[in-house]
Image (tube, rainbow, N blue to C red):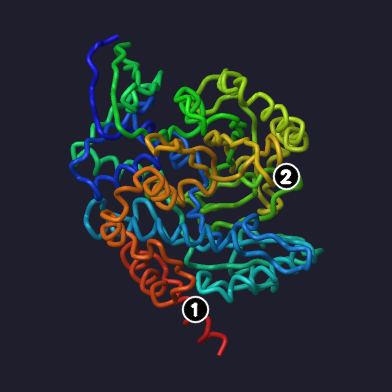
Amino acid sequence: MSNNEIRTDVILIGAGIMSATLGTILKELVPDWNLTVFEKLANAGEESSNEWNNAGTGHAALCELNYTSEKPDGSVDISKAIKINEQFQISMQFWSYLVNKKLINNPEDFIMPLPHMSLVQGEENVNFLKKRFEALSKNPLFQGMEFSDDPQKLMEWIPLIMQDRQLNEAIAATKIDSGTDVNFGALTNMMFDHLESKNVELNYNHKVIGINRTSDGLWELKVKDLESGNVQRHIAKFVFIGGGGGSLHLLQKSGIPEGKHIGGFPVSGIFMVCNNPDVVAQHHAKVYGKAKVGAPPMSVPHLDTRFIDNKKSLLFGPFAGFSPKFLKNGSVFDLVTSVKPDNLLTMLAAGAKEIPLTKYLIQQVMLTKEQRMEELREFIPNAKSDDWDFVVAGQRVQVIKDTVEGGKGTLQFGTEVITAADGSIAALLGASPGASTAVHVMLEVIQKCFPEHMQEWEPQIKKMIPSFGLSLMENPKLLKEVHTSTAKTLGLVNPIDLETKLLIENA
């Protein structure tokens, strides 16, 4: 091991969307800080951020039914949908800023307009969808949403799904044309290209194998060059662990008290991808259904148009799977080695609680191709096996922790940031909505970890994100400005134009 220590201001572990976002924001706020990135793989955005490893949905709660729930009195709670939509608007503002400043180019290479739809069958589900539509469409964040339970209208919206369908029960859908398909892999690479041009040091094929606190409060990282085998020591004032599923092990190595009593449960995913261009051409939307009983929220079935490498694709899934790896390129010992004395009881409690989930995952793993085709045929009645292949998606590690509401060993379905009390280190854990809310999550990291700079940085943050610190829902004028400017810059559909169009049609 080299005795030389290399000093820097900030170290980012993992070259995914989160590190790319944090690095880009910090370079705009403090251009003279030195940033160093370590990535285990040979390129940026190859794990959770890779375009084939996630659904590419710009998660704005336009179509995902698991972000709205029915309350005991029958009304629909849309508070989570509002929160996620507001967070996605923050991402859109930041991406627009990057394009306008020419820090990244060609937004059509990472974001495309695409209708977002929810589709349900059965009278009870149709009633729920109608109530959900009525609650959301009154909210300014969800302008331009339409509802229909008319099979003829649905045939116009989703011909591939409605063709040859036996209509022996009620069916309904909502549709909003201002949805998006996002290629997070392309966006990640664009941001790292920009950072490299700003002299950020990017180290690929480098694995962080140790993290220790020094006596003067800094962080010492042992980093192995996977090509040469050399190990170097790097010292930083601030460390961000954004290594996807690999973050938990690194958080545990840091030894911070905030990282105790936290576990992780890996869930893998499989998508079916259509290889017939004639079928692909017949569908143009992201259509989300309802999750099966016992299925995790990330397993909500959806039929997605995707734009990858400027080519239109069609994916269906995800089917859940199980692998003990925490990363697609991880080790089969990841799950076992993540169990420590401080989180053992938490993990055991989760195991006892989550028997239905375990049973569901086992069932999913055992599915044959034909059984998966049967699930696809609930969306596309005349789907042919020869037209579809499999793609193994990325690993997601769901956070397990003790909570007041859920008690010991509660499985969390979301994105979590764990920070040291002094803000010198932060780790990102969890999954969806993840990448879509990366800008919001990284601003949260900045506020928690650099509170002493916030007053000085706030004017620049507001240049990047005009709605910073405000609720768009409570500021209709600002919302209108944000919708109009981001739609124009990113080449998207403006929800305000949709609302006007619907008012004219319904007049």
Residue 374 marker: 2
Rendered location of residue 493, percent (x, y): 42, 68
Rendered location of residue 94, percent (x, y): 34, 56
- Tell me if I can see residue 248 in this picture: yes
* Of marks 1 and 2, the one in the foreground: 1
Residue 499 marker: 1
Q: Quadrant of the C terminus?
A: bottom right
Residue at 53% x, 46% y: name it.
276
* 169 to 200, vertically: above or below: below
Q: Which class describes the residues within 10 Å of circle 2: few (<14), some (14-19), or many (20+)?
A: some
Please identify the quarter of the rendering in which residue 160 is found. Answer: bottom right
Give the residue type that dot 2 points to. Glu
- Left or right: residue 63 compared with residue 5: right
* First along the sequence among labels 1 and 2: 2
Residue 77 marker: none
The alpha-carbon separation of the residues under discs 1 and 2 comes to 37 Å
Residue at 70% x, 34% y: name it.
361
Rendered location of residue 246, percent (x, y): 48, 28
Front residue of 237/317: it is: 237
Residue at 67% x, 30% y: name it.
346
Q: Which class describes the residues within 10 Å of circle 1: few (<14), some (14-19), or many (20+)?
A: some
- Tell me if I can see residue 163 in this picture: no
Count the marks.
Answer: 2
